[in-house]
Amino acid sequence: MASSGNFSTMNPLNRTSGSVVYTNGNLSFSPSSSWSSTTFTRNNMYIPKDKKIYFELYHKTQSGYYAGYGFGAENAPVTSSEFGATGCITTYYGDTRVNGTRTQSQFTSPSQGDIIQFAIDGSNNKVWFGVNNTWVLSGDPANGSNEIGTITTNSTVGYDIGFIAQQNSVSVLTMNFGQDSTFGGDVTAGGNADANGFGDFKYAPPTGFLALCSGNLSVSDDIDPAQTDDDYPAKQFNTVLYTGDASTNNPVTGLGFQPDMVWIKSRGTTNLYSNAIFDSSRGRAKIVFSDSDRDEDTATSTQDLVSFDSDGFTVGTVYNSGSNINNDPIVAWCWKANGGTTASNSSGSITSTVQANTKAGFSIITYTGTGSNATIGHGLSAKPDLIFTKRRSSNQTWGVYHSALGATKYLALNSNAAAGTDSAFWNDTEPTSTLISLGTEGRVNASSQTYVAYAWHNVEGYSKFGSYEGNADDDGPFVYTGFRPRMLWIKEADNADDWVVYDTARDPFNRGSSRVLRYETYVAEFDGSTRAIDMLSNGFKIRTSNNTINQSSTFVYGCFGDVPFKYNNTF
């Protein structure tokens, strides 16, 4: 039988400003001071979108009826006076709140010794509550009927859902995500497992519902290390460090695959060079710069990036990229597409040329603009969550789409400006599983101008593009990704601030990653100890109140993984 791996627990890194005391291996918890609507806690695994999940809660001790618990989207504003708002389904004082609307009392206020049951269908966000083996409202999770409600998710509250709870300071709640049906020896064992043989529950999980454990977490089949030797995350994206030597032939190896997109930045302080982006669709001699509006540069055969190789790439004498400055420390972030093989795509009103890696959710798209509202095919199997677009044939600022901001807004990769609102970028139309919509803005679709676009979508266990809300505290937000980030960038959306990028090649330790580079400028790497973050096995944790990554504002991010959380590797 396969291993269940680790079961979910409550997460001390993911809480609000109120203090919470955790015991029993982070399964029992209580506020350390008087109950407050700002004192709540979350668990450390989100609900897989292709799974049905079951778990339990025990009222170990209780004072009054001020326990609240349920499910909430990652950015849902759960700190209302009645504990629950849009993006949440919770119960509090015996009533339920469905997306912020208080309903009639649906079950008797819980008492000390009660066991509360939770069931959620991750594919449609339906939620059921039960008490002592009786489902509320005659709920039938196994048949998908008589649910408490359906959680509303959107770009504002987020799309990932987890467990949330709060209670009176003298109350203690104990969770069982499948670890222990006795809740630490307080009740008689149940001995019920899920359909995969995982877990130990007091009551039998409904048919089709599974324990929330790493063994049941989702990883895309195409990149699952247990199913492929060639396409797991480290074979799709990697970061490599090297030292320039100013020669005409400096091979950079150890990447682990042949890259199709290479993003190079000199880290040195003596020679300041732009972030240079190469790809195999345009050809190794064509360069665009993330920190500049200038048009595409063209190098000779021995300059800048000389070739894409089976285990990396070769750089030559420097023309304009900083790819091989003598004695400079250099970093390259590299992605695999389709080995340089492109295809014509006529799905949109503009015929595009696409090089797609559907396993890793990445494509390189080139096209010629029309100056009229249009669409282009992207060649992926799902809606893109991130698009970087650059005009090649003349100077122009970048256009950036991010799914957490939606198609009414845009960012500029070469600017620290806040997100703008302009229908001329994406025609106020979300991308689809086949098309990207373009407006008439010259940054994405001027008549007869040529463009390159890089598009990615979320892939479970490998890539994540989302948002978080800052709290302006040194104990900053925890952001769940489902994997340990190999590379992470962050950009504030509400105000002007830097595009900051971290990676575990330059800073390999979990705690306090602080070697910072920036996408929107050519400045050298600097010690960002005041912008420190932790890279964790299941996401990242902000460890600073620095405005660049943690003020009371919305931040968007993108990251690529080392190892899926499912496989429990220790770093």
Image: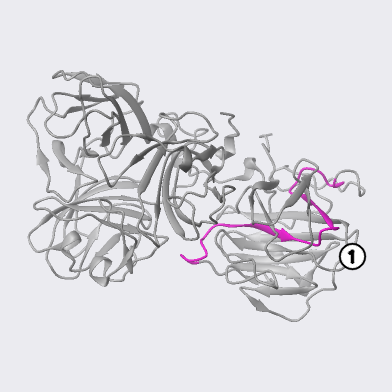
Location of residue 366 in the rendering, given as x and y in whole percent from the top left corner: 18, 51
Q: Which residues are magenta?
A: 154-183
In the displayed structure image, the side of residue 134 where residue 287 appears, left or right = left
Is residue 297 shown to the viewer in this render?
yes
Q: Quadrant of the N terminus?
A: top right
**Disc 1 packing (10 Å; few <14; some 14–19; many ≥20):** some
| Occupied quadrant, residue 146 | bottom right
Picture layout, residue 86 above or below residue 48: below
Picture layout, residue 519 above or below residue 152: above
Location of residue 515 in the rendering, given as x and y in whole percent from the top left corner: 41, 34
Q: Which residue is mark 1?
A: 111
SS at badge 1: loop
Location of residue 271 in the rendering, given as x and y in whole percent from the top left corner: 21, 30
Q: Please name the residue shown 48% across and 66% down the image.
A: 156
In the displayed structure image, the side of residue 268 where residue 505 appears, left or right = right
Please name whichever residue, 461 or 467, is drawn nearer the observer in this view of the structure: 467
Location of residue 11 in the rendering, given as x and y in whole percent from the top left corner: 67, 47
Q: Please name the residue shown 52% across and 46% down the image.
A: 544
Amino acid identity at mark 1: Ser
Picture layout, residue 374 above or below residue 246: below
In the displayed structure image, the side of residue 260 where residue 12 appears, left or right = right
In the displayed structure image, the side of residue 315 where residue 139 appears, left or right = right
The image shows a total of numbered marks equal to 1
Is residue 208 shown to the viewer in this render?
no
Please name whichever residue, 170 or 46, is drawn nearer the observer in this view of the structure: 170
Picture layout, residue 15 above or below residue 341: below
Q: Main secondary structure of the magenta part?
A: loop
